[in-house]
Structure formats: C-alpha cells, structure tokens
Amino acid sequence: MWKKELKVAKEAASAAGKILIRLFGRVIHVTKKGTIDLVTEADFQSEKTVIDIIRRYFPRDSVLSEEFGEHDRSSGRTWIIDPLDGTTNFVHGFPFFAVSIALEINGELVAGVVLNPFMTELFEAAKKTGAFLNSNPIAVSGTSNLEDSLLATGFPYDIQERADEVLNRFRKMVVVSQGIRRPGSAALDMCYVAAGRLDGFWEQGLKPWDTAAGKIIIEEAGGTLSTFRGEHYTPYQNSVVAANPFIHEAMLDAMNS
C-alpha cells in the first residue's frame, strides 16, 4: 500500500531538493516571521514545487504547508509539507536541512519522506512496511541506558520568553546522558533516531510539518513517541519525546524530575 503516494512524495522531495541545492549559499532575500524565525525565497520555491507535483497526481487532496498555510481539508487526505526544515542552517550555509513530506488520511499518518539533499539521504516509511534510508532498512538503536545515549534537541522560536524552562530541561538531560546535539532540523533529528544515529530526541513548540514525516519514520523503525507528559503523540501537540523503546521512559523521568 501507499506505493504511488510514496513515489510521488519522493519525486516532489527530489525536485524541491534540487532547488535548495541550487540556492544554497546564494540566498539574498531573508525575511523574519519572528525574532529568530526566518523565511527565504528557497522556502517558497521549494514549497510551490512540492505542492504542484502532489496536485498533478492527487488534485483532490488537501495540503497543510508551512508557508502557504492550510488549504481545504475536506478530502480526508492531507499532505503535510515542510519545504525547508532548518531554514536558519540554510541561511548560514550550515548543511543540515531537509524537505519533509507526509500524508495523513482521516487523522492517521500513513506515509512520510524526509530528504537531506546536501547529503543525498532519503528517509522514507509507509504504514506497516518498515523504514528505509536510501532504500536500505533502518531501525532504532539498541542502547538501553540513558547514560550511554546520544540525544538531540532543539530550541523553540519563543525561547526568549521561556528560556529558564527550556534550559532547565536541557540541563537535566545533559547530566544524565552521554551527549546532546542541537543540529537545527527536527525532521532530520527524528530520522536520525529512526536510523539509530541518535538514541533519543525531544523538543517543544514544533508545528505539524516539522514532525509529521519523522513520526511515521520513527514508528516504522521501532521507536516510541510521546509528549513530555508521556501522552500519545500527534504532530498537532506542543511537545515530543522520540526515542528507542529502551530509554524512552528514562528520558521522560529525567526531564520531569
């Protein structure tokens, strides 16, 4: 199932990725949606390309995208799109960014694709078919102790207003883990958990397009997701903890201690 949808998502991600590589290091117009929330012409060109390709094959499907917002969702099939996850990295020439595309049907994620065009790494998954990196199967790590774990996180765009809360949680996790990385792309962080490169990830203040594809990729790779409170996670919630199943509870315990 979902073979056509995955094929179209990969075609769209590849086309958008070519735009990002062409513009990488050449961005001229940068505007701010918030104090540290940037948007560039690369975001808009990439998003238009993704939407145009999806609508060519699925003209009746709905779209929820970062820059163009929400289109009619009455179809029951919604493509959730982040055309450039890691815009700040992109603007500064830091090569850790991605195109993220997911398909949600009647509230359930059924397929997801995340492409890092700079590293030519394509992560993908569909419901009950497993997760893959460049067509090779991937799985979460087997690390069983939090103190042996490499974790990742990100900071919300309103960190100036909640710095104490965010940094207190960061401090708790630093002292109980082997190390923490803050690469700057939630979609890729989640895929790195799925591939076993990271053992766990947490962040708050994310949007559906940041995590939708990553969620199904992690689940199909054998990982576990929840909110900070341990509740069932959907991309429409404000916090996420994603990890291999062996350290997930320990992460929750540590950050809520």
Image: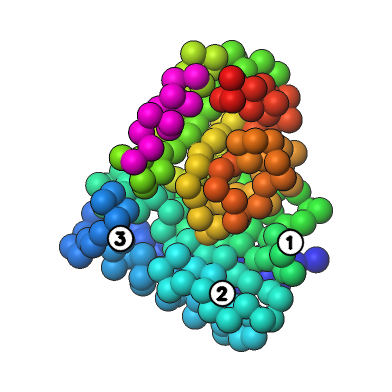
Q: Identify the colour scheme used.
A: rainbow
Other-residue count near label 3 (Cα within 10 Å), few / some / many at <14 / 14–19 / ≥20: few
Q: Which mark is residue 63?
A: 2
Q: Residue at x 48, y 26 (%)?
A: 169
Foreground tag (2 vs 3): 3
Front-most of 218 and 106? 106
Front-most of 93 and 168? 168
Q: Which mark is residue 246?
A: none
Look at label 2 and name its amino acid: Val
Q: Is residue 187 magenta?
A: no
Q: Residue at x 64, y 27 (%)?
A: 252
Residue that carries the numbered disc 1 in the rendered image? 108
Mark 1 falls on what kind of element? strand
Magenta span covers which residues? Answer: 161-172
Q: Is residue 170 magenta?
A: yes
Residue that carries the numbered disc 3 in the rendered image? 33
Give the x, y percent position of residue 251. Answer: 62, 25
Q: Which corner quadrant holds the N terminus?
A: bottom right
Residues at marks 3 and 1 touching, judged by CB atoms closer than 8 Å: no
- Horizontal relation, residue 103 to residue 80: left or right: right
* Displayed quadrant of residue 64: bottom right
- Horizontal relation, residue 241 to residue 154: left or right: right
* Numbered label tally: 3
Mark 3 falls on what kind of element? loop
Q: CA distance from mark 3 to mark 1?
A: 29 Å
Q: Is residue 74 above or below residue 217?
A: below
Q: Earlier in the sequence, mark 2 or mark 1?
A: 2
In this orientation, does residue 168 appear? yes
